[in-house]
Amino acid sequence: MPKFWRKVFLIYLKDLKDEFRTTDHLLSTLVFGTMLVFVFSFALQLVEIGTAQVFPAVLWVSIFFMAILALQRSFAKEQDNGALDALLLASGDRSILFYAKFLFSLTVLLLLEVVVVPLLWIFIDVAGAKANLWFFLGAVFLGSWGLAAVGTLLNGITVQLPGARLLFPILLFPILIPLLLGAILCTQGALVGEIKAVSGWMYLLVIYDLLFTILPLLLFDYVLEG
């Protein structure tokens, strides 16, 4: 098992170095997320609506679209360079590749959120008097975990198919509906301080994340066939 996680960590570090060696994709995704913040905040200034009601939906719509751009590259780099087969041989166990790509995708997504979430909070002017910050951060983290896990799994399924970039978001959204519902409701509960009312949704997020984190141990050997 230590050897398993050592290989995971090495592939994870390789991906991080590749991403930060040329930050074009990361910066373009960040600019896209920032533009979403400006567009939403400008649109919401034109209508009278409570920020606690609209902020969770706007937040997760922004994160979802950023995730599509960020997660599509988890396997695409190796596929474009013809290095995917070599990486599979080097890793040995294909689930090693999943966990390395999952951790990389989660790290990138969290880095993007460190910028985008505070910007959205400021521009929409959320009143935080009743907000439970730890519950809010927990909801964001668990939602991001699920996005990274499902996105990595689906990316592995679609990366070798024709039209993979179109198939990925089409397949991603239906599977993420339970996660997005839970994340939006937990975020809203955190903002208004009604944690008990949404605690069941938080448990759903945990179960969903564990399911799509453990399932690849059984399935990922078949995912990258062909």
Image: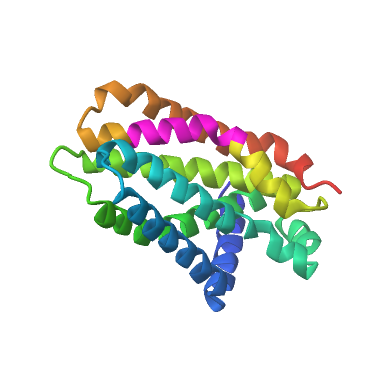
**Residue at the right extreme of this rendering:** 226
Q: Which residue is drawn at 35% across and 40% down?
A: 56
- Residue 59 lies, in percent from the top left, at 39, 46
User: Would you say 25 lies left or right of 128 here?
Assistant: right
- Reply yes or no: does residue 51 show up in magenta: no
Quarter location, residue 170: top right
- Residue 195 lies, in percent from the top left, at 25, 28
* Along the line of sight, the residue nearer the viewer: 94 or 141: 141
**Residue at the front extreme of this rendering:** 46
Judged by its main secondary structure, the magenta piece is helix
- Residue 5 lies, in percent from the top left, at 56, 52
- Residue 160 lies, in percent from the top left, at 80, 53
Q: Residue at x 32, y 43 (%)?
A: 55
Q: Residue at x 49, y 33 (%)?
A: 179
Image height of 182 relative to 24, above or below: above
* Magenta highlight range: 174-187
